Amino acid sequence: MVAQALPTYAMSVFQLTKSFCDDLEQMCARFWWGSTLDKRKIHWKTWNVLCNLKEEGGLDFRSLSEFNAAMLAKQVWRVLNNPTSLIARLYKAKYFPDGSFWDALPHASLSFSWRSIFSTKALLEDSFCWQVGDGSSISVFSNNWVSALPSGKPSVSSMAMEEVQHVSDLISVTGVWNDTLIHRLFPEEEAALITTIPLSRRSVVDRLTWKLSKDGKFSVRTAYCSAFSRASNYTP
């Protein structure tokens, strides 16, 4: 049982090297096509094609590098949604004491475990969106919070940056959007999209939502599909 669980556990904590994943995938491909040590049979399809969904002509095998990334992204998602947990506080104290995970920068002295989960930053940035609560945790120009915009955030202007920093700055004391301020700082189309975002009548905290799932909850499967589709070696 432990032997079966160990690979999955390792993939959710550490980033496996590309060469290691390639070697394992080659072994799987040779087994699939019936190759032996003394006889190599024809591989009629590349491994990437076999990793495609069945409805796309593949066999739904797992690309190890992308599955590894999805498992690591799950750990980051837990840290982001549980900022008071011990591991989240440790990471913040060491790697982004004056900001958030999204403000953290790569550094040569990082621990291997942090470097592993930090490698999923780009994957997560493309796949999440903030749900506006009181707006105090959301940076207007750095975070994705306007899902209707391609970039997930409004255009940057020097005037807007001088006046607002967090989304809470765009919300009036009565708990509704400050229409006058928003239309003055942003282009008309962006302002219209911002003001259509619903606000709670109660004071609630901002929360992360996973754009790839209907319920907004993170799933390894959707993260894997996203990682696989964006991989440079992806072959449809």
Image: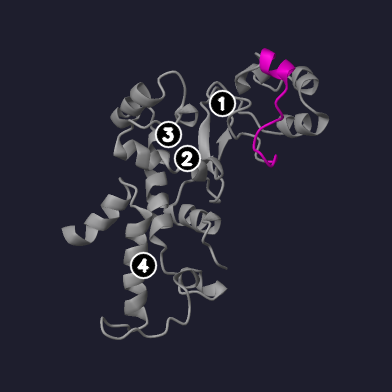
The amino acid type, in three-letter code, at marker 4 is Glu
Mark closer to the chain start, 3 or 2: 3
Task: Report which quarter residue 120 is drawn in.
Answer: top left
> Which corner quadrant holds the N terminus?
bottom left
Circles 1 and 4: CB atoms closer than 8 Å: no
Q: Residue 121: x and y, percent?
A: 47, 40
- Could you tell me which secondary element the residue under label 2 belongs to? helix
- Residue at the spot of label 1: 138
Tell me the residue at 31%/52% (across/down).
Answer: 11
Mark closer to the chain start, 1 or 4: 4
In magenta segment, residue 188: no
Please state if 172 lies on the left or on the right of 56 as rendered. Answer: right
Mark closer to the chain start, 2 or 4: 4
Q: CA distance from mark 3 to mark 1?
A: 13 Å
- Residue at the spot of label 2: 121
Q: CA distance from mark 2 to mark 4?
A: 25 Å
Assess disc 3: are there few (<14), some (14-19) or many (≥20) residues with their C-alpha within 10 Å of its C-alpha: some
Mark 4 or 3: the one toward you:
4
Residue stretch rendered in magenta on the structure: 148-163
The amino acid type, in three-letter code, at marker 1 is Ile
The vertical placement of 114 against 217, above or below, is above
The amino acid type, in three-letter code, at marker 2 is Lys
Assess disc 2: are there few (<14), some (14-19) or many (≥20) residues with their C-alpha within 10 Å of its C-alpha: some
- Could you tell me which secondary element the residue under label 3 belongs to? helix
The amino acid type, in three-letter code, at marker 3 is Leu
72 or 222: which is nearer to us? 72
- Residue at the spot of label 4: 25
Q: Residue 143: x and y, percent?
A: 58, 31
- Could you tell me which secondary element the residue under label 1 belongs to? loop
Tell me the residue at 33%/65% (across/down).
Answer: 23
In magenta segment, residue 149: yes
- Residue at the spot of label 3: 80
